Amino acid sequence: MELFIYLFFALFSVLNPIGTVPIFVGLTQDDSKKERSRISLWTAIDVFIILMIAFLVGRYVLEFFGITITALRITGGIIIASSGFSLLNGQFNKNKGINKKVEQEIQVRNDIALTPLAMPMLAGPGSMSLLITFYQEHHTTTEIIISSLAILGNALVIYIILRGAHYLSKMLGTSGIVAISRIVGFLTIAIGIQYIISSVLTIIRGI
């Protein structure tokens, strides 16, 4: 249970689905309620598939390129902390590559579930590196099942949040969403720094 709770909240902090609410509202403001529901569902499914691939196959990619787990933890820690700083500074959307030009291009497409919502808005480098690193330390059958459930849990939460995004946007307002995003950003920075500290200690012990 502790493993599930740790991965669930660590992953939730990095994914930050609440911070995606304003983007989702902006991109789907002209869509029907049924279409928004469909986009929410497929975004959650896409995120789950992307994260499971990163979790189960990521280590083989590392081995192919000769990247050590310590290097990945440091890189992932930097990326995660950077995402956290972006949340605190209100630059999360810019950091994810979403600007006015991109938004205009997205508006003319029929499906936004995979890009940009699932990737890179939600399942970005930070969440992928977190899962790859996590797998290196927790890869027994039981741990894989528990981790998969944590990933599935986040996908379900993403669906629920996006499904009610327009309601949340009206209820919380811009200031409410910003406040929550900044709290999540603080936690995300802490997770990233912890990854870096653990990696540095591993290097020192190996000297």
Image (cartoon, helix red, strand yellow):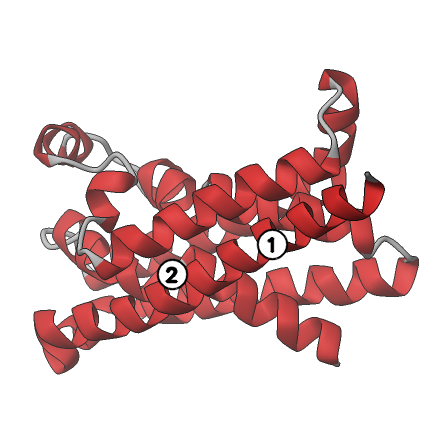
Horizontal and vertical percent for residue 202?
75, 48
Residue name at image x 17 percent, y 56 percent:
90
Q: Secondary structure at mark 1?
A: helix
Tell me: 21 left or right of 174. Answer: right
Q: Alpha-carbon neighbours of circle 1 within 10 Å: few (<14), some, or many (≥20)?
A: some
| Labelled disc at residue 16 | 2
Residue name at image x 51 percent, y 67 percent:
156
Q: Amino acid at mark 1?
A: Ile
Tell me: 127 left or right of 57. Answer: left
Say whether residue 123 is visible. no
Q: Secondary structure at mark 2?
A: loop
Q: Amino acid at mark 2?
A: Asn
Residue under label 1: 197
Total numbered badges shown on the rendered structure: 2
Towards the viewer: 182 or 60 = 182
Q: CA distance from mark 2 to mark 1?
A: 23 Å
The answer to which image quadrant residue 142 occupies is bottom right
Horizontal and vertical percent for residue 171?
14, 82
The quarter of the image holding the C terminus is top right
